[in-house]
Image: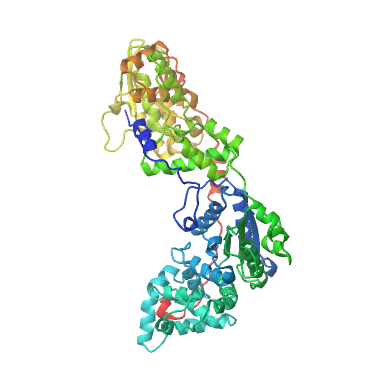
Amino acid sequence: MTNNPTSPIEAINAAIQSDNPFINAGIVKEQDIWKKKSPDVPSLNAHASDAIFRAIELVRTSQSSQDKVTSIAITAQQGVGKTHLLSRIRHHLEKEGGALFVYAGGNNYTDLNLVKYQFQQTLADSLSKTGSQWVMQWQEVAAAIANEGRSENAPTPAELVKKFDQAYAQSLAKNKNLMNALQKQVLKNKPNADPYILRAILWTLSETQAAFAIKWLSGEELAQVNADELGLPNPSKTNQDREAEALKNIQQILNLVSFYNPVVICFDEIDVRNNSTDDGLPTEGVIANLVKILHDTLENSEVSQGVVILTVMLPETWRDKVNSMPGGTPDRISKYTQRKPLELKHVSGDSMVELVTVWLKEFYSEKNLIPPHSLYPFEESKLREYGKVSKPSVREALRWCADNFKIYEEPLPSDPFERFELAFKKESEADIGDYIEDSSLIAEALYFGFVTLKFQTLEGVMIEEVTNDIKPKAYHINYIDFKIIGNERGKEVKIGVAVIQSSQATLTAGLKWLIDYEKYDLTRGCLVRSEYKIKQVKNNSSAYKLLNELISLRGGEHVDLIGEQIRPLIATLAVYQKRLNYQLKEEEIFDIISKNKITFDNLLLREILSNPSGSMPTIDEEEDIQLIDNFLNSSSNISETDDSDELNELFS
């Protein structure tokens, strides 16, 4: 017998009783946006994330300057998953690329009189987070600036960061300045760029100077020695001075950055209760006005990669406050959706099941456990009912899960047959799709089924022995899973059974074993494989020829693996393997199986023992298979360009 495909129920229950993954799971904090990806249900509010990705593609590819800056308002009640949605966007961009990500949580705006300066700090901080190329987003931009005009073989951002400091030091040793050369080269193509902002972005390529450059880009003052090393101006300023200059700096940074990458800016939770401005404006009014200013003043160049601004708020904030703001503000805040905010939805019955499945998958993976089913200890019907009736927010759904993540142990019946009946019903409810591809489990279930039939006669064969000790033994693998030894009408029979649900290469190897009756001491070979997999065998393949030899020349057979026929055998095996959990003895299980003819009447076991028909199964036409292969293997040509290389100290 092989190991049980699920972990011992005692270990699973102990893990559930000692750790609850749903506690505090519904609260997504700002720092979670940038941390390891949390469990996500892609179908939950997919309409919103899909719209955002389409907006990113629009600003990136549109040839119209008017489409290069767009915006989306997102509304939802507390706990429905607003910040969770932004986390999905962020982690998708980190994994797949496609845009830079800026997160501006409302809690960061502690002084609304300095909102532009504080957003400049947010912008600098967000771009210092790791992007899709395993370096800071600033460094992705700096590398794109430095590599502009070079071939596809230009150094990656990580390679430039690794070699920059050494190349800079080597240039100084030769009385030259690599940074000056880079800045001069870029300004030829970007004459309107602020030379100091451009220089500071390029300095982020330096592992030793990046922190100082980012601090300067955020609007903060440097120690004079650091400013001198970077070649950046460093006048003393009040916060009011910084606020006055912040918008110009933000515009310069975003115009330059968005030339190379689309930028997604997320203003989250603009409903927070911060102190109002000197003239009485609340947080939502101040941030809404900032979004309007950014929309109207960012450079709308046809060659820009564009900017998408997301603004997240409660439905009542949009309805009662933002939507009534004058000067076209609502149109600027939700331009992409034509002044119609994206409304996030509550959890449904389907998404409730998906949500719990995703969270439990991570929980069991971390514990190195395989549960009886993906929702254990929950019941799918109860999850669906809760989602359908309650229509909870994500936070409410996860809180409900935390309260109900328990083991409910019902007392077992006193009668052994009733205990077996309960166990068999429970094990039969498993999804057969989870097992139908598992050749070893299927072989084990068949083996156990025949073991329960020893000294009984089926299809004219009296079963005397069932063995998985196939000789001669192979070093790595046995393609014949077990052998049935018996007596058929006075003649000894030795039927070798091979369950092969995997690749055609494995099928070919297994058939070579099955037809070698002399070597493996067989009188008949039996291949167990799903009919649809047999139909995929090509007419001119080695597997087809071997299958034909097995059936037509050697008197063997192919038996179709039918899910509903293997299900009770897998359930019976599971009951036997978990007999201690169900307080059943081995002899009790065998006695119940025999009395109820569970294996005796099984059509799959009978088909294996029955006289072979001698007929080859129907194989799909070669032309159809070739047509599909040609389609799947088609590819398109990709053109390449090659440009000259400059600044050898850095790019060589």
Res 82 seen here: yes
354 lies above or below 577: below
Please, is residue 517 above or below residue 228 in the view?
above
Q: How is the image coloured?
A: rainbow
Residue 563 % position (x, y)? 48, 27
**Residue 544 occupies quadrant:** top left
Residue 607, position as x, y percentages in the image: 44, 19
Quarter-of-image position of residue 455: top left
Q: Which residue corresponds to the image point at 50% horizontal and 67% vertical from the top-left?
A: 127
Q: Residue furthest bottom?
A: 175
In-front residue for pair 307/184: 307
Please count the marks in the image: 0
- Tell me: 610 left or right of 185: left
Q: Which image quarter is the N terminus in? A: top left
Asked if residue 524 shows in the view, the reply is: no
Task: Locate residue 438, reporting x and y percent.
Answer: 41, 33
What residue sits 50% from the left and 75% below the top? 217
Q: Residue at x 43, y 39 (%)?
A: 503
Say whether residue 436 is left or right of residue 74. left
Instruction: Give the percent coordinates (x, y) of residue 133.
Output: 46, 63
Position of the C terminus, as image quadrant, is: bottom left
Observer-nearest of 249 and 308: 249
Q: Relative to residue 573, is residue 286 depicted above or below?
A: below
